[in-house]
Image (tube, grey):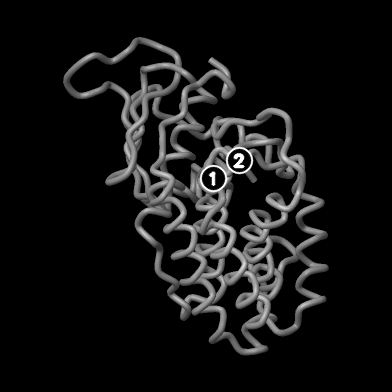
Amino acid sequence: MSPAKKRARTYDPARIRTAVLAQFGHVRQAVGTLTDEQLALPTRLAGWTVRDLAAHVTMAVATVGRNLDRDEPAKAELTLLQWPFATAARARDIADGTRDLAAANPDVDALYAGTEERLARNLADAPGDRLLATRTGAMTLADHLVTRTVELVVHTDDLNDAVPALDIPYDRQALAACTRLLADALAAKAPGGSTEVRIPPYAVVQCVEGPRHTRGTPPNVVETDPLTWIRLATGRLAWADALAEAKVSASGERADLGGLLPLMG
């Protein structure tokens, strides 16, 4: 079954909207404490400084307003489960736009304040079924907001990695949605029922072709925590390194996910 045919789980639109606002608020508060020296630090994203990364977070949510300002597409082109696999094609454009945005907005606090105000205004009354012409393809606002939890959580982790003293918290709903979408994307990429991937407390999916497990303890089990899973799914952490560092447990001959990861870059 292709990513296009794999059925996505549903998300509570009100909770997702609240989660997006909450996680952006957490990042804004932390970024506001950064010094010029910290903003100039490198990140694990090649060629990006903390200032670039901070600017990118505003870009990731500003797309909501920009897309609402555009004409509504005639039909949806992209589902939630297709989105993770569609992002790589736009990586270069996004990187260029991020650096331009950072250079044009030296006052990071002002950039965040304006972005947060517009985001809250946009989310106050826009219907979830409104179609948006996003970079990766036309999709509903409700689905686009779920993808924003991925952007926000992943880049919160990037910022915490670059400046550990920030210790930006994760909104529970945002972290849950991000974890679940990336877990479902794995199940879409490698359909099957021979391997169970557990990411407590948010997700359990079955994947990989082979004998389907029906009851009792599955013969092939992978288990890890949400942030480790997100790092694996987005290429921040290699499968072999996660195993070596005991950040993931994998038992069974079909429990090696190294060839399936990352899901998005």
Between 71 and 154, the one nearer to me in the picture = 71
Outermost top residue: 211
Please name the residue that numbered disc 2 is placed on.
130
Query: In the rendering, at what x and y percent does residue 169 appear?
Result: 40, 69
Asked whether, in this view, residue 99 is left or right of residue 23, the answer is right
Cα separation, mark 2 vs mark 1, equals 6 Å
Q: Which residue is painted at 49% across and 31% down in the image?
A: 186
Q: Which residue is painted at 33% across and 12% down in the image?
A: 212
Q: Are marks 2 and 1 in contact (CB under 8 Å)?
A: yes
* Numbered disc total: 2
- Label 2: few (<14), some (14–19) or many (≥20) C-alpha neighbours in 10 Å: some
Q: Secondary structure at mark 2?
A: loop
User: Is residue 143 positioned above or below 27 on the image?
Assistant: above
Please name the residue that numbered disc 1 is placed on.
127
User: Is residue 42 positioned above or below 250 on the image?
Assistant: below
Residue 110 — which label? none
Q: Which residue is painted at 62% across and 67% down in the image?
A: 118
Between 81 and 264, the one nearer to me in the picture = 81
Query: Which amino acid lies under the numbered mark 2 shown in the image of this protein?
Result: Arg
Q: Secondary structure at mark 1?
A: loop
Outermost left residue: 216
User: Is residue 42 positioned above or below 213 on the image?
Assistant: below
Query: In the rendering, at what x and y percent does residue 220 appear?
Result: 32, 25
Query: In the rendering, at what x and y percent does residue 132 appear?
Result: 67, 42
Asked whether, in this view, residue 52 is left or right of residue 195, the answer is right
Q: Which residue is painted at 46% across and 80% down in the image?
A: 165
Query: In the rendering, at what x and y percent does residue 101 appear?
Result: 78, 69
Between 193 and 128, the one nearer to me in the picture = 128
Query: Which amino acid lies under the numbered mark 1 shown in the image of this protein?
Result: Pro
- Label 1: few (<14), some (14–19) or many (≥20) C-alpha neighbours in 10 Å: few
